[in-house]
Amino acid sequence: MPLYKLISEPGNEVLSIWKITETSTGLLSLLKAKNISYEIPQAFMHERRRAEWLCVRLLFA
């Protein structure tokens, strides 16, 4: 998980920047390791968009 930068601000705001190098399959494996399951929406046809969607879920996990 290449979390590039994590910036904490006063008031509990956090900005996370992730450089996506994983495939959606690899990201799904990371979610399963945390006992979290998501089904990727069918509307996401491109691999890059699926990976972006999964990265957001991992950042919130």
Image (tube, rainbow, N blue to C red):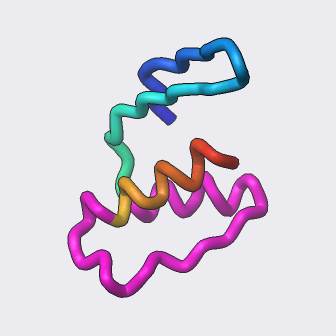
The part of the image, by quadrant, that contains residue 6 is top right
Residue drawn 77% across and 62% down? 35
Apparent side of residue 37 relative to residue 35 in the rendered image (left or right) = left
Residue drawn 46% across and 76% down? 40
Which segment is the magenta one? 24-49
Q: Position of residue 28 (x, y in %)?
A: 54, 62
Question: Is 38 part of what is drawn in magenta?
Answer: yes
Residue located farthest toward the right when viewing the structure as drawn = 35
Q: Position of residue 2 (x, y in %)?
A: 45, 30
Apparent side of residue 37 relative to residue 46 in the rendered image (left or right) = right
Question: Is 6 part of what is drawn in magenta?
Answer: no
Above-or-below relation of 54 to 55: below
Above-or-below relation of 10 to 35: above
The part of the image, by quadrant, that contains residue 52 is bottom left
Residue drawn 22% across and 70% down? 46
Count how many numbered circles sit on residues in the image.
0
Residue located farthest toward the bottom when viewing the structure as drawn = 42
Q: Position of residue 41 (x, y in %)?
A: 43, 81
Q: Position of residue 60 (x, y in %)?
A: 64, 47
| Front-lying residue, 34 or 45 | 45
Residue drawn 37% across and 57% down? 51
Apparent side of residue 34 relative to residue 21 in the rendered image (left or right) = right
Residue located farthest toward the front when viewing the structure as drawn = 11
The part of the image, by quadrant, that contains residue 8 is top right
